[in-house]
Amino acid sequence: MTKNNIDNTLIEEFVCEAPNNQVKKESFASNIKYLIVGTIFGIVFVKAEIVSWFRIQEMFRLQSFHMYGVIGTAVVVGLISVQIIKRFKVKTFSGETVSIQDKTFNKGQIYGGLIFGLGWAITGACPGPLFAQIGSGFLAITVTFASAVAGTWLYGAFKNKLPH
Amino acid sequence: MIELIKQPWHWAVAGVMIGLTVPTLLLIGNKTFGISSSLRHICAACFPANISFFKYDWKKEIWNLFFVVGVLLGGLIASQFLSNPNEFVVNEQTMQDLKALGVKDFSAMMPADIFSIENIFTLKGLIFFVFGGLMVGFGTRYAGGCTSGHAIMGLSNLQLPSLIATISFMVGGFAMTHLIMPLIFKLF
């Protein structure tokens, strides 16, 4: 992820985990389509009660199949879609080749994953539901959201001191 | 039809729609699904503080911010116009377990005795909002993704690191629910 510059200072390559791989530049207005996809996504989150703290508690107490059903079905549908796109070399609407970066393993996925899991059970929210909860009128969650931004910032600030 | 939409949606309907978000984003703009990255873009846009992790062209990734604003709007639309007219249902056993811990309100998606504005400046608020949020933001970035980026996008693309991350999320969640949360509730 990092390499040494000529004068031996670390330069960091930018790796985005949810990147924009489109070569063609997009206008500001064309981003509206992501707003629409996000809106539908948010409606699903609320209507399937994925934003509920109780549904997350049911999941971690193995007392309801609901969340396992949601995530399991989403993975199966996503998997089939990605395989179709790869197998048939389906192009994007603007004619580009679909590119998905492989993820590389580092210990952060374990340490960070455990920390996120602790937070997920206590807040009842992963980052997506945080936005949907605020939209649903649970305004106290703005504090959780601000703290999540702060947590991300702290990771950025101390990244090089953490085991990866 | 609208009456049907107002009912809580079956997990299969939600799962299919969430799963379809993956190819939708890939095909409409070659975008890889992931939500926690939005938190990083917010840091990069608002408080980069000369930290190398936040020095990048966040404007190129602005689609992600449009997406999460959409999620917020979706939450608003669903709760204002499509809300469930019936009583909110919590699993009986879960309700018993949580009552034993001291949770009192089961009438809505979030228990009001924890997730209310009045609790922001209390110990409950500090733990459930501030510490919880810090762990979500720090943990997802440390892990390189959240439920969407790893559990859904990563597993859809058969990525072993994403499976490891997803298992870690679950282990963390089980540990909090069964080991740490009983201790937390003793504080109140």
Image: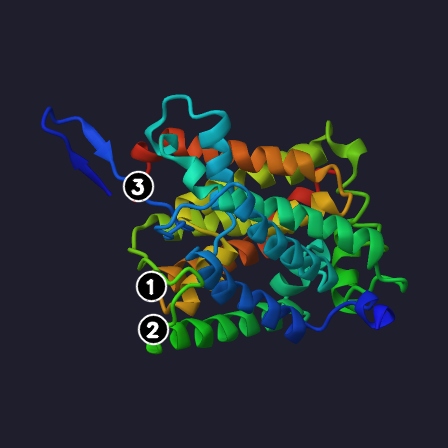
Q: Choose between A14 and A161: the one closer to the eye.
A: A14
| Residue B6 locus on image (x, y percent) | 83, 65
| Residue A77 locus on image (x, y percent) | 51, 74
Q: Same subunit under labels 2 and 1?
A: yes
Marks 3 and 2, how far apart at CA: 38 Å
Q: Report if the CB atoms under discs 3 and 2 are less than 8 Å apart.
A: no
Marks 1 and 3, how far apart at CA: 35 Å
Alpha-carbon neighbours of circle 2 within 10 Å: few (<14), some, or many (≥20)? few
Q: Which residue is mark 3?
A: A163
Marks 2 and 1, how far apart at CA: 7 Å
Q: Choose between B79 and A10: the one closer to the eye.
A: B79
Q: Choose between B100 and B73: the one closer to the eye.
A: B73
Q: Report if the CB atoms under discs 1 and 3 are less than 8 Å apart.
A: no
Image quarter where the C terminus of chain B lies is: top right
Q: Which residue is mark 1?
A: A97
Disc 1 element: loop
Alpha-carbon neighbours of circle 3 within 10 Å: few (<14), some, or many (≥20)? few
Q: Quadrant location of residue B13?
A: bottom right
* A76 vs B73: above or below: below
Q: Amino acid at mark 3?
A: Pro
Disc 3 element: loop
Disc 2 element: loop
Q: Which residue is mark 2?
A: A89
Q: Residue visible at 42% across and 67% down?
A: B155
Instruction: Give the label, 1 or 3, closer to the camera.
Output: 1
| Residue B32 locus on image (x, y percent) | 43, 56
Q: Report if the CB atoms under discs 2 and 1 are less than 8 Å apart.
A: yes
Alpha-carbon neighbours of circle 1 within 10 Å: few (<14), some, or many (≥20)? some
Q: Same subunit under labels 3 and 2?
A: yes
> Would residue B13 appear left or right of B50 to someone viewing this image?
right
* A29 vs B94: above or below: above
Q: Residue visible at 45% across and 46% down?
A: A26
